[in-house]
Amino acid sequence: MPRVAGAVALAALLCLGLSGCLSTSRATAVALDDSKPAYATEDCQSAIRATEVHETLHTGRIIATPVLLVLTAGAAAPLLVGSNIALDAADRVDASKLSEACGGPGKTTGEIAGDVAGNAALGAVTGAALDGVAGGGDGLASRLSRFLFGGATGTASR
């Protein structure tokens, strides 16, 4: 069991490191050009204040996802993956709207979908790498990665 706890701790730290500590909406708000006239509008300021919801959800899912995966022995993986993808998509859509409201460029639906897919793929690859660090290619993250993206196990050569 200490091996599992170590893997969960490592996963949580790596998630924090890879994702930074900011949601996409909050990162967009921080990067806004406050010299643009649109920045001072109520629409922009309201959109900036609304980033707190995404920030809270972002922090919560970074902590909760690995814990719930371990507690459910992976049974909750499809639900967690789906909910994280949905929350990531909502965060990115709102970040795009925030940028537009404050005089910056927005993103197209295709760009947002590509960002979400890339983030999900990075999570699966990172999880598979964590399995290797935690002691095996047939760990929870590797099984989840194979479930999502197909492929054979990495244990045949051991």
Image (spheres, rainbow, N blue to C red):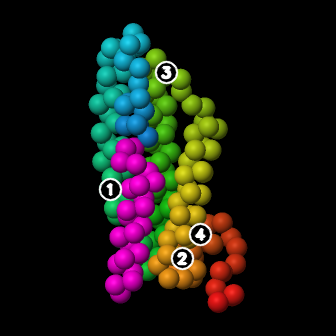
Residue in the picture at 49% in, 37% down:
93
Q: Amino acid at mark 3?
A: Gly
- Is residue 116 depicted above or below 100 in this figure? below
The answer to whether residue 140 shows anywhere in this view is no
Q: Quadrant of residue 151?
A: bottom right
Q: Amino acid at mark 2?
A: Gly
Q: CA distance from mark 2 to mark 3?
A: 42 Å
Mark 2 vs mark 3: in front: 2
Tag of residue 72? none
Q: Amino acid at mark 4?
A: Ser
Marks 2 & 1, CB-CB < 8 Å contact: no
Marks 4 & 2, CB-CB < 8 Å contact: no
Count of numbered badges drawn on the protein: 4
Mark 2 vs mark 1: in front: 2
Which residue position is annotated with label 3? 104
Mark 4 vs mark 2: in front: 2
In the picture as drawn, the residue positioned furthest to the top comes out as 37
Which residue position is annotated with label 4? 145
Marks 1 & 3, CB-CB < 8 Å contact: no
- Is residue 35 depicted above or below 12 in this figure? above
Label 1 or label 4, whichever comes before in sequence order: 1
Q: CA distance from mark 2 to mark 1?
A: 25 Å
Residue 117, position as x, y percentages in the image: 60, 51
Residues shaded magenta: 1-23
